[in-house]
Image (cartoon, rainbow, N blue to C red):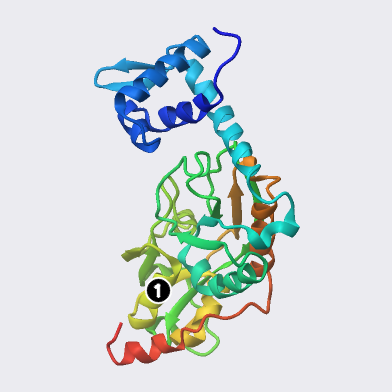
Amino acid sequence: MTNTYDLNLLTALDALLSTGSVTAAAARMHLSTPAMSHTLARIRESFGDPILVRAGRKLVPTPRALALAEPVRALLAQAHALRGPADADSLAGLRRRFVVRAPEGIAVVFGASLSIALQAEMPLAALQFLPETYVDPAALREGRIDLDIGSFRTIDPETRTQVLSEQALVGAVRAGHPLLKTPKKTPITAERFAAARHVGVVPRPGESSPVDTSLAALGLQRQVALLVPSTFSALIAASRTDLVASAHERSARGMAASLGLVIFELPIPVQMEPMRMAWHPRHQADPAHRWLRDCIARILNDPHWIKPSVASLTGNARRGVI
């Protein structure tokens, strides 16, 4: 191994390890494939390791390459941060797109407030939401998203997390739903709840619904007649059908009036689900990222958040528009 090496090789190394392909890495770095092959040869010489070796038709990283991947990515992120604002006072001039993976209801219920806050502090920045169904386990680690928000139960030990809130799950049905037609002051039983047709939200890979878990503990099982990608979609479906939705209390109550929903306490003991925010440690000290985390935590816990203007949804639905 040589005593020195070109620091530009780190960018090429990151591209090679991220793509696992000389051709794809070349395209990312706007180089020809032969030029990238030459760069890979220089990387191998500098690190005294093959880095990528052929296995069938693919290139696979060596153990040394796997060990280098995260430190190299972190170094590049730190180098990139040097070009940004030095402190929070410089955020007004920052041009940056923050990508957040979150339940759709976060964008619907809190998107307006977050946009207004962003305009006040970082007017040149933008906020992009990706749905929870965007399956990319390495997205935080490899920098494709900046924040991950949700009630996820499996957490990468490499990430930093913060509990935003703990919310109970509640039931939501349209006014006049058969489940509500019980004698006065008679509670909805677990059996009647389970016997109804439900709309469920597609869980994250490897996770199950806490409602199903609680019902199973009682020897009951519900029929999920419709699966949708978000709580917001589930609430809309419940407002137009006899399906029963189970949703976080704040989202459900925020949408109830506009969608004509009746909220009720679930007749089964369901553990409160913490809403978490996760990020990669390389963003821990970044002033812009720290401001975004603080802003999201503040707005999601603000009782005076700007409620979504969805009253038109009910009117349009009556006219068959949506």
Task: Classify residue 166 as left or right of residue 226.
Answer: right
Could you say which quadrant of the image residue 201 lies in?
A: bottom left
Q: Where is 247 relative to 317, above or below?
A: above
Task: Classify residue 106 as left or right of residue 237.
Answer: right
Question: 234 or 176, which is in the foreground?
Answer: 234
Locate residue 32, reporting x and y percent.
31, 29
Could you say which quadrant of the image residue 281 lies in?
A: top right
Q: Callout 1 environment at 10 Å: few (<14), some (14 to 19), or many (20+)?
A: many
At 50% from the left and 24% from the top, the residue drawn is 9
Q: Where is 297 relative to 117, above or below?
A: above
Q: Where is 148 relative to 35, above or below?
A: below
Q: Which residue is mark 1?
A: 244
At 52% from the left and 75% from the top, the residue drawn is 252
Locate residue 74, reporting x and y percent.
59, 34
Question: 121 or 56, which is in the foreground?
Answer: 121
Which of the image's four quarters has the C terminus? bottom left
Task: Classify residue 36 as left or right of residue 7.
Answer: left
